[in-house]
Amino acid sequence: MLGRIISHISLASVLLFSGALYIHAAPPKVADKVLPEQESEWVTTRNFAQKALRDGEWSLTRELYQNALILAPNATQKALAYAYIGTSYYNENRTKPALENLNQAIYLLEKQTPLPRENLMAILNFAAQVAHEGDQKYLSTQYTKKLVSYYASDPKIWQINKPKDIYRHKLTGINFPEKIGEFRRISVDAYQPTGKDVGASYRADLKNDKFIKITTYATFIENQSLDKVFSAYDQGMIKYLEQVEFDKKGKFKIPGSKTKGRYILYLTNYGQGKVLTGMWLMEFDNWYIKIRATYPYDQK
């Protein structure tokens, strides 16, 4: 990644990553598929339900969508009816029934082949918001993790070379190959449907059950200085870690380029014992490339 410039990471870790990686709440509608004899009653009921939803008539919305569930011509339309019923409960600040209906919608969508990706991700995103606002942080995290897993294979975000197992981020051109030197990829993630916040994690195993873990993130951030973004990320990292001790910070420059960045390292305890963990941040045309690395203290 950042090689010899970052004295704490030996081997070719950082330099390798910089060079190898950077080469170069309403769900959407779906088409109605109905039998002729069902069409008139289904469409009429759905249209009245949508009007009630727009007008904020939450009880009427639920009544009409309950009828729509009976008439729905396919599982996707049933799932959307459950989602809108959940929306009506959400607007009355009734978190529990809202999530019960959203869960039913998610269940129906996940059973379908091919997967109705856009509808599913929209409902997962909304469910995560409802759970978070209802102070159900664990549940919100589970929805978010599932959402990220679906984004990770979204063809609008990634160009996937299956024979070589390379994920290429379309907006930046960053490649995440299966292996980089001694590092093997263990995850590919996307945190937004726009593809403007993505990442991938790599791990290299060492002796005595120790390992080095490196995660590279690419995030689009406008109208923010490198120092301000670095400070925000640093504060977030400190909150996440426990019993940290400051080790080192400084600036770096990518060899052979004009790109400069900042880094910071902390000493802490992890499952493998005493470790150094830190962040390296650089900026390319409003894209912030953040590299998080954690490795045994005796590997510095």
Image: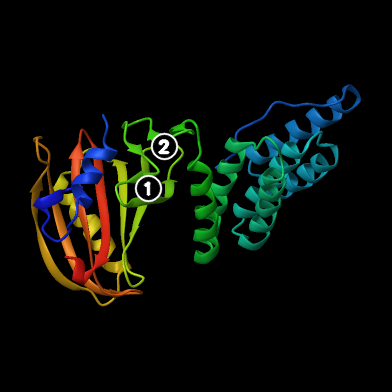
Q: Residue furthest front?
A: 207
On the image, the x and y values in percent for residue 130 come to 55, 55
Taking the image as shown, residue 22 lies to the left or right of residue 115, namely left
Instruction: Quote the CA–CA distance across marks 1 and 2.
Output: 9 Å
Quarter assignment of residue 273: bottom left
On the image, the x and y values in percent for residue 86 come to 66, 51
Residue type highlighted by circle 2? Tyr
Taking the image as shown, residue 277 lies to the left or right of residue 166, namely left
The answer to whether the residues at label 1 and label 2 have Cβ atoms under 8 Å apart is yes
Q: Which residue is mark 1?
A: 200
Answer above or below: position of 139 versus 168: below
**Mark 1 crowd level (few <14, some 14–19, many ≥20, 10 Å Cα):** many
Taking the image as shown, residue 135 lies to the left or right of residue 269, namely right
Label 1 vs 2, first from the N-terminus: 2
Q: Does residue 130 show up?
A: yes
On the image, the x and y values in percent for residue 143 come to 55, 55
Along the viewing direction, whichever of 117 and 210 lies nearer the viewer: 210
Dividing the image into 4 quarters, which one contains the C terminus?
Answer: bottom left
Secondary structure of the residue carrying tag 1 is: strand
Q: Does residue 229 show up?
A: no
Q: Which residue is mark 2?
A: 167
Along the viewing direction, whichever of 9 and 137 lies nearer the viewer: 9
For image coordinates 18% across by 58% down, the residue present is: 9
**Mark 2 crowd level (few <14, some 14–19, many ≥20, 10 Å Cα):** many
On the image, the x and y values in percent for residue 67 come to 83, 42
Secondary structure of the residue carrying tag 2 is: strand
The image's colouring method is rainbow
For image coordinates 49% across by 42% down, the residue present is: 151
Residue type highlighted by circle 1? Ala
